Amino acid sequence: MAEQRENDNIHALWESIRYYQTQLEGRGHEATQLPIFSEADCPFVDHLGAGACASVNRHRMEFAVKRPKSAAEAEWLRKEAEIMACLQHPNIVRPLGWVRPQDDSHWGLAMPYENGGNLKNFIRKIH
């Protein structure tokens, strides 16, 4: 019974994500309703990690910035940010805003910095 309720919750979450994805087609950073920070105002502190699509760095003001590696990944990150901003769940991080780069690289997504390592290592600890 509890497992069915959890499956229903996951299904509802995915339906919400799909809905917001369709609503976000063709919108730019300025339409995301998230504040925009200048990279000059929040300098780099250290590198936290990288995945297939983006690298993550810690910046002053204690937030992490996820920066995409390509234009296609930048578009995916923009959609991800919009969806994350619309969802309210204790296990989903809310984006803080966009970080406008000083050079011609892609905009980064600022998120709260949590000093606890990455999700992969956390899952390994509990299993």
Image (tube, helix red, strand yellow):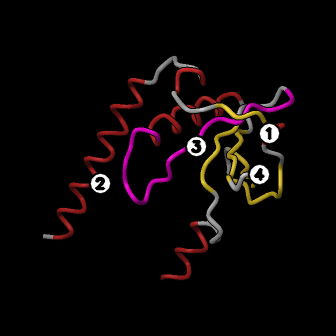
The spot of residue 9 in percent (x, y) is: 25, 55
Amino acid type at mark 4:
His
Discs 3/1, front:
1
Specify start and end residues of the magenta stretch as a single range.
85-103
The spot of residue 58 in percent (x, y) is: 75, 55
Discs 4/2, front:
4
- Check disc 3 and report the residue beneath it: 96
The spot of residue 80 in percent (x, y) is: 52, 38
Asked if residue 50 is positioned above or below residue 43 in the image, the reply reads below
Q: For the N terminus, which image quadrant?
A: bottom left
**N-terminal label among 3 and 1:** 1
Task: Decide which of 119, 45 is in the foreground and name it.
Answer: 45
Measure the alpha-carbon separation of dots 4 and 2: 33 Å
**N-terminal label among 4 and 1:** 1
In the picture, the disc for residue 41 is 1
Measure the alpha-carbon separation of dots 4 and 1: 10 Å
- Check disc 2 and report the residue beneath it: 10
Q: Is residue 41 left or right of residue 31?
A: right
Prevailing SS of the magenta stretch: loop
Dot 4 surroundings within 10 Å: few (below 14), some, or many (20 or more)?
A: some
Amino acid type at mark 1:
Asp
- Check disc 4 and report the residue beneath it: 59
Measure the alpha-carbon separation of dots 3 and 1: 14 Å
**N-terminal label among 2 and 3:** 2
Measure the alpha-carbon separation of dots 1 and 2: 38 Å
